[in-house]
Amino acid sequence: MTGKNNEDAYGFTAWQQDDRRLYLAVVADGVGGQTAGELASHIVVEQMMSYFAELPELATRNVLNHLLQAITQANTAVYARSQSDKKVQGMATTVVVTAIYNGRLFTSHVGDSRIYFWRNEQLHQITQDHSWVQEAVDAGLLTAEQARTHPNRNVIRRSLGTAPETQVDQTPLSPGAFLLKQGMPLQKNDTLLLCSDGLSDMIDDSAIAQTLAKHGEDLHTAVDDLIQQANDAGGRDNITVMLVRMLEGVSPMSDEELDTPTPPTATASGDPTTPTKNPRVVPVPLDKKQKEQRARQRRFILLAVVALFIMVALIALYLFMNGWM
């Protein structure tokens, strides 16, 4: 068998100012072979974590803009490294991000990693894959089941790092009667599942739903079970699964309301220190005293995370043989 580097990366961070809190979860799945994909995914996660860790302030109305700005910064960093180092030229990565700010959900994604939303025993895929097979499904050329096993299932149409610009999707799916919009207030026990295609290529949505229902509040066991099922089904790729559960609901009328429309897509490009159009705040360099203060705040925030959220992130790396190679 041929070994495969772990090209997935994930991260979770918390941000707090007064009584306002942000919880950020990120999963990235690198592509490019050997160490290139691994480097790309880790750069993206580190850039996302760094951006929000140093953010001086935040408001509900500009969370999406900050997600775009952070992804802009990450795309630029991966592309610059790819252009300057021949060993990793062509590297790229997907990314999915959930930001929970004062109990409201915001998402952004690029590529075919996914976000699922679990509420009232119902599972909803809320991101649209940017992939060749998804386009074929949309055109009626393939069924969803055929797409899962098609030879082109890993061909993605969007990624970070392959060009100075990339299209960031900030329009969540609202399947069936389920209505999801950016900034939607979360309810108690709402659960988000972020994953790389190492999970979604191996097991279908019904299996994911059955697993979450089976294990209830035991998120650790649910993650272990999902990874085991993906491995038993072939385990052809790295498998990253992250579960984030809301332990307290938020009133639909609480906090400030959104006052700007959600763009269907946005372009991430340019110098990461250059703000996108009319942002309310942008990161600023911190002096030593400020950094020490932020570090103390982050230690306090970690305690708050334990009280408000359960976050499970487990990653498994398996040896595999690519069937098409």
Image: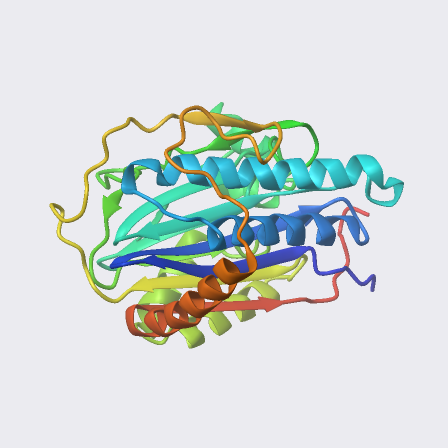
Q: Residue at x 80, y 34 (%)?
A: 83
- Count of picture labels: 0
Q: Nearer the viewer, residue 141 or 174?
A: 174
Q: Is residue 155 visible?
A: no
Residue 256: image quadrant is top left
Q: Residue at x 65, y 59 (%)?
A: 238
Q: Residue at x 31, y 47 (%)?
A: 105
Q: Residue at x 65, y 42 (%)?
A: 154
Considering only vertical position in the picture, is 73 above or below 117? above
Identify the residue at the far right of this view.
Answer: 86
Q: Nearer the viewer, residue 295 or 64?
A: 295
Considering only vertical position in the picture, is 93 above or below 53? above
Coloring basis for residues: rainbow
Considering only vertical position in the picture, is 268 above or below 225? above
Q: Position of residue 132 (x, y in %)?
A: 60, 31
User: Which quadrant: the N terminus?
Assistant: bottom right
Q: Position of residue 189 (x, y in %)?
A: 25, 64
Residue 261: image quadrant is top left
Q: Nearer the viewer, residue 127 or 292?
A: 292
Q: Position of residue 70 (x, y in %)?
A: 52, 41
Q: Is residue 8 visible?
A: yes
Q: Position of residue 68 (x, y in %)?
A: 48, 35
Considering only vertical position in the picture, is 147 above or below 5? above
